[in-house]
């Protein structure tokens, strides 16, 4: 270092001082704006995933791309499947939250002939990627919603 270069200090607050918090919710929606738990096999549906950093100042520093995967596991005999992952960039300058919709085409669930319905457990996984496309420490999941599919 030359005599003309100053050695300086940058103060970096800890994440606790910046109060980084986050929440994850997922709603199964079909036929209207409200969440449901029962759909017809030939009905389109969607899962609306919401990730919220709850107004944290630190969230403004994050430039993330969220990768969301939704899967369904049947209870008893039935088709288990995973939908194609959906990716969406989060611009936290606009909002500390992001909403991502995963579409479920009609007839994605299968029923046996003369079947009275099948119950599926829904699972949602989220993973944040950085600007280089590499996983960050931000990830999460929710599981347990039961969806009944009827003829």
Image (cartoon, rainbow, N blue to C red):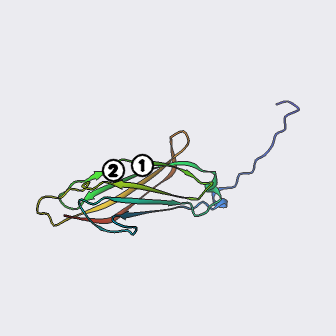
**Marking on residue 83:** 2
Furthest residue to the top? 2
The image quadrant that residue 70 belongs to is bottom left
The number of callouts visible is: 2
Q: Is residue 18 above or below residue 34?
A: above
- Mark 2 lies on a secondary structure that is loop
- Mark 1 lies on a secondary structure that is strand
Place of residue 143 in the rendered image (x, y in percent of width and height, measured from the top left): 36, 61
Furthest residue to the right? 3
Q: Quadrant of the N terminus?
A: top right
**Marking on residue 48:** none
- Structural distance between the alpha carbons of marks 2 and 1: 9 Å
Q: Which residue is under mark 1?
A: 86
**For this rendering, which residue is in front, 68 or 36?**
36
Residue under the image location 35 percent in, 47 percent down: 84
The image quadrant that residue 122 belongs to is bottom left
Residue under the image location 78 percent in, 46 percent down: 9
Place of residue 136 in the rendered image (x, y in percent of width and height, measured from the top left): 52, 47
Place of residue 34 in the rendered image (x, y in percent of width and height, measured from the top left): 39, 69
Q: Is residue 7 left or right of residue 145?
A: right
Residue under the image location 60 percent in, 50 percent down: 62
Q: Is residue 6 left or right of residue 23?
A: right
Disc 2 vs disc 1: Cβ atoms closer than 8 Å?
Answer: no
Q: Is residue 148 above or below residue 98?
A: below
């Amino acid at each position: 270092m030359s005599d003309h270069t100053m050695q300086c200090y940058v103060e970096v607050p800890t994440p606790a001082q910046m109060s980084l918090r986050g929440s994850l919710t997922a709603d199964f929606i079909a036929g209207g704006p409200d969440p449901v738990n029962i759909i017809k096999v030939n009905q389109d549906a969607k899962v609306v995933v919401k990730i919220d950093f709850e107004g944290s100042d630190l969230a403004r520093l994050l430039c993330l791309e969220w990768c969301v995967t939704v899967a369904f596991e049947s209870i008893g005999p039935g088709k288990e499947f995973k939908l194609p992952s959906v990716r969406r960039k989060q611009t936290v300058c606009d909002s500390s939250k992001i909403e991502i919709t995963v579409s479920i085409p009609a007839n994605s669930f299968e029923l046996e002939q003369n079947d009275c319905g099948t119950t599926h457990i829904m699972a949602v996984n989220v993973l944040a990627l950085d600007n280089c496309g590499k996983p960050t420490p931000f990830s999460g999941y929710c599981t347990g919603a039961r969806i009944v599919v009827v003829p």
